[in-house]
Image (cartoon, rainbow, N blue to C red):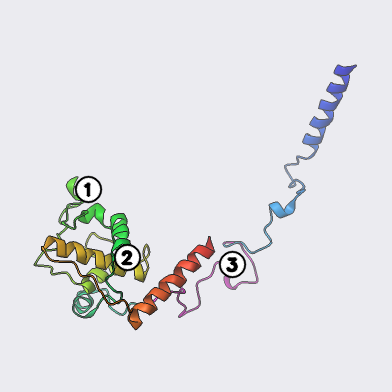
């Protein structure tokens, strides 16, 4: 008797499973909210949008919040102009130096080396050649040239504008200048004035807003 009940129960289950499947017609959705989102999907087809797709280009002239335009062109003339005129707007503090070192170790040291002597791990393994030392007299790097190269890239070095924001790039500039001073046997610059300039206050405020927006997005 018990076996008969078990067999009947198994048969009922099998019939239910088979009856729910029909190749010519989709099955019933018992919880449609788990399958069909209420919001528009990024690459979904919707007639309400121009072109029928939700993913559209930003409005012409719009910029991301916290992003600032860079007025120097990606050319030799732009590089030389930045090298001669572009200055670091943030103060050279120990805090900025430490932050710059952390970022430098992530993005730069693999090629330029921990000391800035152009002998990073990839150079030592001969994966990349010709990386100059920061104290190379022929290049005579400046705050502006360092920032410009990070923004656009140069030769085999790519741009780091997408990985870092403006404030972080200037912190890296300070640390690169510190490494250059060490190689030259000079004392690295540290500003003792505790009052930030108007430009620095603006850069730090934009960096803070950008960081908050990134945190809220997660």
**Residue 61 shown left or right of residue 118 in the figure:** right
Q: Which residue is mark 3?
A: 54
For the residues marked 3 and 1, what is the alpha-carbon distance in whole angstroms?
A: 45 Å
- For marks 1 and 2, the one nearer the N-term is 2
For the residues marked 1 and 2, what is the alpha-carbon distance in whole angstroms?
A: 27 Å
Which stretch did the figure color magenta?
A: 43-69
Look at the numbered disc 3 and give the secondary structure of its residue: loop
- For marks 3 and 2, the one nearer the N-term is 3
Which residue is located at x 19 percent, y 45 percent? 125
Residue 137 visible from this viewpoint: yes
Look at the numbered disc 2 and give the secondary structure of its residue: helix
Percent position of residue 2, x then y: 87, 18
Q: Which residue is mark 2?
A: 95
Percent position of residue 131, x then y: 17, 57
Judging depth in this view, the residue of 24 and 89 nearest the camera is 89
Nearer the viewer's eye, disc 3 or disc 2? 2
- For marks 3 and 1, the one nearer the N-term is 3
Which residue is located at x 26 percent, y 67 percent? 173
Percent position of residue 12, x then y: 84, 30
- Check the image and name the residue furthest to the left: 137
Reply yes or no: does residue 57 show up in magenta. Answer: yes
Q: Relative to residue 202, is residue 158 depicted above or below?
A: above
Q: Which residue is mark 1?
A: 121
Judging depth in this view, the residue of 216 and 7 nearest the camera is 216
**Residue 218 shown left or right of residue 198 in the figure:** right
**Residue 207 shown left or right of residue 132 in the figure:** right
Label 3 Cα crowd, 10 Å radius (few <14 / some 14-19 / many 20+)? some
Which residue is located at x 19 percent, y 56 percent? 115
């Amino acid at each position: 008797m018990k076996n008969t009940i078990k067999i009947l129960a198994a048969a009922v289950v099998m019939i239910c499973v088979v009856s729910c499947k029909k190749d010519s017609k989709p099955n019933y959705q018992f919880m449609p909210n788990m399958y069909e989102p209420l919001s528009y999907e990024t690459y979904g087809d919707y007639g309400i949008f121009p072109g029928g797709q939700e993913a559209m280009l930003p409005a012409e002239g719009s910029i991301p919040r916290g992003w600032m335009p860079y007025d120097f062109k990606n050319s030799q003339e732009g590089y030389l102009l930045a090298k001669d005129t572009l200055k670091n707007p943030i103060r050279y503090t120990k805090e900025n130096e430490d932050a710059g070192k952390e970022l430098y170790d992530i993005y730069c040291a693999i090629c330029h080396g921990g000391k800035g002597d152009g002998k990073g791990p990839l150079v030592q393994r001969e994966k990349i050649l010709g990386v100059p030392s920061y104290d190379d007299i022929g290049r005579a790097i400046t705050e502006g040239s360092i920032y410009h190269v990070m923004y656009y890239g140069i030769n085999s070095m790519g741009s780091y504008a997408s990985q870092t924001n403006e404030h972080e790039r200037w912190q890296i500039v300070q640390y690169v200048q510190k490494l250059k001073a060490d190689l030259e046997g000079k004392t690295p610059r540290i500003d003792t004035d505790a009052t930030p300039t108007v430009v620095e206050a603006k850069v730090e405020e934009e960096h803070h807003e950008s960081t908050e927006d990134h945190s809220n997005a997660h």
